[in-house]
Amino acid sequence: MRTAVVVGAGIGGLAVAGALARSGWQVTLLERADRVRPDPTAVVLWPNGVRALRALDLGAGLDAIATPLPDGGVRRPDGQWLVQPRPTPADRMPVVVHREDLHDALIAGLGERVELRTGVCVRTVRAEPGQRPSVGDGRQRFEADLIVAADGTDSEIRRQLAPESRVVSSGCAAWRAVIPWYRAPRLPAEAPVGGETLGAGYRFVSASLGERGSSGASSRGGIYWVATAAGAPRPEPPQTQLTLLRRWYAGWPAPVGELLDATDPADLVQQEIRELRPLPRSYGFPAGPGGVVLLGDAAHAMPPHLGQGACLAFEDAATLASLLRESRLPDAVAAYDRLRRPRAATVVRQTRRMSAVLQARGRLALRARDAALGAISPRLLSGAAASAAQWRPPS
Ligand SMILES: Cc1cc2nc3c(=O)[nH]c(=O)nc-3n(C[C@H](O)[C@H](O)[C@H](O)COP(=O)(O)OP(=O)(O)OC[C@H]3O[C@@H](n4cnc5c(N)ncnc54)[C@H](O)[C@@H]3O)c2cc1C
């Protein structure tokens, strides 16, 4: 039986571990934390991410927890439209999912053949021709035919195999929360949840997770919001961070203020936004009968402006699983690199163009940003949507 070690039980690691196990592999999943636990926030999955999850046989689980996200348009802080909402065909509509529900669905997909070991922090990797690849935590070594590095932005495995790729700040921080329905404000019809608002270096996006009062499959419904601001994360406690957010977003069109007011500081998740520059020169490192591959944020951490990080992690997992079913192991490692690097580079390029537009500060830059956004947004957005729509798992 073929064996794999997957390092990191984030959404990328869970997805690929389950996929390999369902294809008959014996999988060991190593996680440095004591518990496998996501942020209590949500994630938007674009059609490419949804398609990847379906290719991974996780479509039914997803359908039970996902809420469609119609286009809500883009407004300026004075309420004027930068981009009007447009009707989206059902097959191109993204969905929004609570991360805890997504984790539960991915864990349910692990099955019997995955040995999950928590509290194991991988510190070393060995990937040399002629030797089975392995990782170690300083006490034990874990050898397998294939090692999948799904250990996130600060991947130790990537640091050793692709040291040219560095983690750098993207120059902004993000705050997220889910307001449970029982605490969510009742909003007037003219200020619905959904869509985004863009100001000078500030951005606010909201989405409904299920419907108030509906007894859907998830008990974690509510209103999800994410605010991005140029600059560093704040050292103050969450209550003060919320006060700052209310000040920064004061006067923005409803429901921005209402959602910030209804947020419990205990639910606030702050994060510095970071990315890889440059991307690793390879995503596949041959060793012994197989090798080591990079997957998810370990391979292509990027700012969340297009909401594609998790989607790409699922694409990675679906591509790897498909290649491993169709080809010999060394060929699959090489093909994975060939297929995934250009795809990630394209999405990272689009994300960086969005970063330049979103993080414009100063009056001139802002005017240029508004003009640029008005002019290029449909192209940018349809470009992102087109690459999303075009992606197909290899058959
Ligand atoms: C504000 C924000 C909003 C976002 N919104 C979206 C969105 O709407 N849509 C979207 O598609 N993406 C979004 N993303 C991106 C998405 O969250 C990430 O791309 C995705 O979670 C990456 O998953 P991962 O499994 O690759 O990495 P991670 O989730 O970082 O998981 C890595 C795992 O590896 C473990 N680990 C790390 N080092 C070691 C080690 N040495 N040994 C063992 N285990 C280790 C960690 O503990 C962790 O469990 C967003 C990101 C941010 C910051």
Image (cartoon, rainbow, N blue to C red):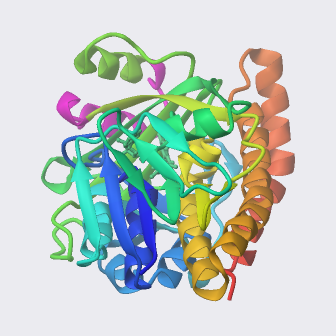
Q: How many marks?
A: 0
| Quadrant in the picture for the N terminus | bottom left
User: At 59% across and 71% down in the image, what residue appears?
Assistant: 320
Specify whether 42 is left or right of 211: right
User: At 79% across and 41% down in the image, what residue appears?
Assistant: 353
Q: Is residue 110 magenta?
A: no
Image location of residue 12, percent across then percent down: 46, 58
Out of 283 and 304, give the one closest to the viewer: 283
Point out the stretch of residues depicted in magenta. Answer: 248-267
As drawn, which residue projects farthest toward the front?
Answer: 130
Image location of residue 84, percent across then percent down: 67, 57
Q: Is residue 283 above or below residue 388?
A: above
| Visible residue check, residue 44 | yes
| Quadrant in the picture for the C terminus | bottom right
User: At 47% across and 36% down in the image, what residue appears?
Assistant: 124
Q: Is residue 256 magenta?
A: yes
